[in-house]
Image (cartoon, helix red, strand yellow):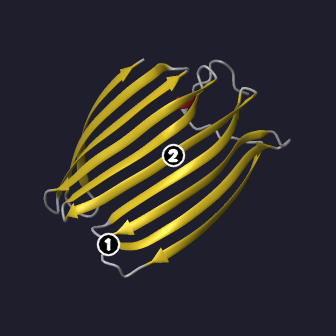
Amino acid sequence: EIDEGFRADSGLMPQVGMRNYMAALNRTFRSDSSWWNSFTLATGMGRFEKIDGELINQFLDLGIFYSGTRQSNAAIFLRKESERYLGIEYDMVSSMGMFSIKPTNNIRLSLDYNVGNRIDYANGRKGNRVRTDSSITWSLNKNIQTSYDLTFETMDVEENQLYTAFIHQFSARYQFNTRLFLRTLFQYVDNSY
């Protein structure tokens, strides 16, 4: 049983006493075109409930995936979701997406986003969240790789800003051989509430 002193960050607590149902349907189109390799249309749905049938979470996803030249990939998903928390059912809509490309042999660029409704679990309210993750990876040679990642997230609840967070991370890795590497990370976090 979970009480007020429970800390989720102190370890994994498996969820028991629940059932889940999931289904997905995808259709992939392939091409020998010079600018695209494949497009996939996808839909999926799921429902998580307690053993007695009470809703925990249910969702419906619609999405499209793209794979193309220069190892480029993109995806956009739309999600309609219902989640029950502290006895209240929240209806939410969100969009998720990603894009990555390798414009040269030694550089990879990527951008992920997630925009839409989320629950403020600390106060039991529905809000709007925006999250982006961007990165650039540069392989200087076969042994040295550097990367810079920027994560931005903000959440508003009832027209007021709940928080804004920026996480900057730089990493450098030296690969000695296939089994041994040395990695250094530098991280700067800037949060405002």
Q: In this view, does 91 lie to the left or right of 12?
A: right
Q: Which residue lies furthest to the left in this view?
A: 140
Q: Split into 4 quadrants, where in the image is the N terminus?
A: top right
Q: Label 2 is placed on what type of residue? A: Ser
Q: Where is residue 60 in the image (x, y as percent from the top left)?
A: 65, 51
Q: Which of 115 and 145 is in front in this view?
A: 115
Task: Identify whether 41 is placed above or below 168.
Answer: below
Residue drawn at 33 percent across, 57 percent down: 100
Q: What residue type is labelled 1?
A: Trp
Residue 63 placement (x, y as % from top left): 53, 58
Label of residue 177 in the image: none
Compared with 52, 38 (above or below) is below
50 and 157: which one is in front? 157
Question: Residue 181's image quarter?
Answer: bottom left
Question: What residue sits 62% from the left and 18% below the top?
Answer: 5
Q: Position of residue 187 (x, y in %)?
A: 27, 33
Q: In this view, does 32 lie above or below 100?
A: below
For label 1, the residue is 35
The quadrant of the rendering that contains the C terminus is: top left
What residue lies at 69% left-to-right and 21% top-to-bottom? 3
Mark 2 or mark 1, earlier in chain: 1
Q: Residues within 10 Å of mark 1 (few under 14, many from 20)?
A: few
Q: Mark 2 points at which residue?
A: 95
Judged left or right of residue 135, residue 139 is: left
Determine crowd level at label 2: few under 14, some 14-19, many 20+ residues with C-alpha closer than 10 A: some
The image position of residue 96, as x and y in percent, is 48, 48
